């Protein structure tokens, strides 16, 4: 996990890379329908600091909603780390994980609790503040993702570990459900590097 500030960084975690910050075009991210790409959004990292997604320009992104107490957690965290190890340096993959407590209350903890859990999982990818992915209070980025790539039974997020692949231009190109393990996405990701 890479963080901008070390206040919530458990021992052994990597620090967030320092990016140059460019002004975000959509103040507050409220108008997700007029967004041209994911780069029009900001999200708070796990420390609560604004992170413009524009900082990820030129990278293939895997955006996923995560939870620490889900039956899918062990496999997903392990395989997301493996994807990070395989592609972060060699191909520039960036994995953006958004904790969410909307599915059977499987992410109940604070940011500090989430960091402690992530440390035990040896998380190397980017972790953000807990958000809602469905409903009126859903983060605008997630409203945008769902609008661009709806699911088979509707655009709402059905469970933890829904995965969106974003190309190097910030466009949502694929959506994969919770039952698609990250290791099954290697061929999909390679198309966009």
Image (cartoon, rainbow, N blue to C red):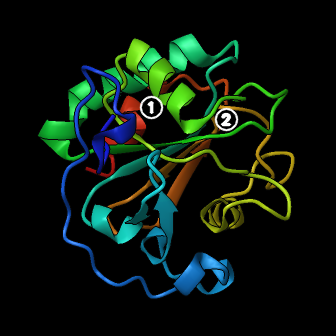
Residue 73: image location, x then y, percent: 59, 17
Is 38 displayed left or right of 6 in the figure?
Answer: right
Front one among 89 and 185: 89
Q: Which residue is mark 2?
A: 177
Q: Does the image show residue 80?
A: yes
Residue 98: image location, x then y, percent: 56, 43
Q: Could you classify mark 1 by the number of other residues whose Cα lies within 10 Å: few (under 14), some (14-19), or many (20 or more)?
A: some
Q: For residue 20, what is the image quadrant?
A: bottom left
Q: Residue at x 30, y 48 (%)?
A: 5
Q: For residue 147, what is the image quadrant?
A: bottom right
Image quarter hosting the N terminus: top left
Q: Could you classify mark 2 by the number of other residues whose Cα lies within 10 Å: few (under 14), some (14-19), or many (20 or more)?
A: some
Front one among 61 and 40: 40
Q: Residue at x 65, y 68 (%)?
A: 140
Give the vertical position of 20 relative to 92 (above or below): below
Q: Residue furthest left?
A: 90
Residue 182: image location, x then y, percent: 48, 26
Q: Does the image show residue 183?
A: no
Secondary element under disc 1, as helix, strand or loop, is helix
Is 2 displayed left or right of 131 in the figure?
Answer: left
Q: Which residue is mark 1?
A: 185
Give the vertical position of 62 relative to 36 (above or below): above
């Amino acid at each position: 996990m890479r963080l901008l500030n070390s206040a919530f960084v458990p021992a052994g975690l990597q620090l967030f890379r320092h990016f140059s910050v460019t002004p975000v075009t959509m103040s507050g991210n409220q108008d997700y329908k007029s967004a041209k790409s994911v780069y029009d959004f900001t999200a708070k990292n796990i420390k609560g600091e604004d992170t413009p997604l524009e900082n990820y320009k030129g990278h293939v992104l895997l955006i996923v909603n995560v939870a620490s107490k889900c039956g899918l957690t062990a496999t997903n965290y392990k395989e997301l780390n493996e994807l990070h190890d395989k592609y972060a340096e060699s191909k520039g993959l960036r994995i953006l994980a958004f904790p969410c407590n909307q599915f059977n209350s499987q992410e109940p903890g604070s940011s500090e609790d989430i960091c402690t859990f992530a440390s035990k999982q040896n998380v190397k990818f980017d972790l953000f503040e807990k958000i809602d992915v469905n409903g009126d209070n859903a983060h605008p980025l997630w409203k945008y993702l769902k609008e661009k790539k709806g699911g088979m039974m509707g655009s709402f997020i059905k469970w933890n570990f829904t995965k969106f692949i974003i190309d190097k231009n910030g466009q949502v190109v694929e959506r994969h459900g919770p039952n698609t393990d990250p290791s099954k996405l290697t061929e999909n990701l390679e198309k966009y590097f």
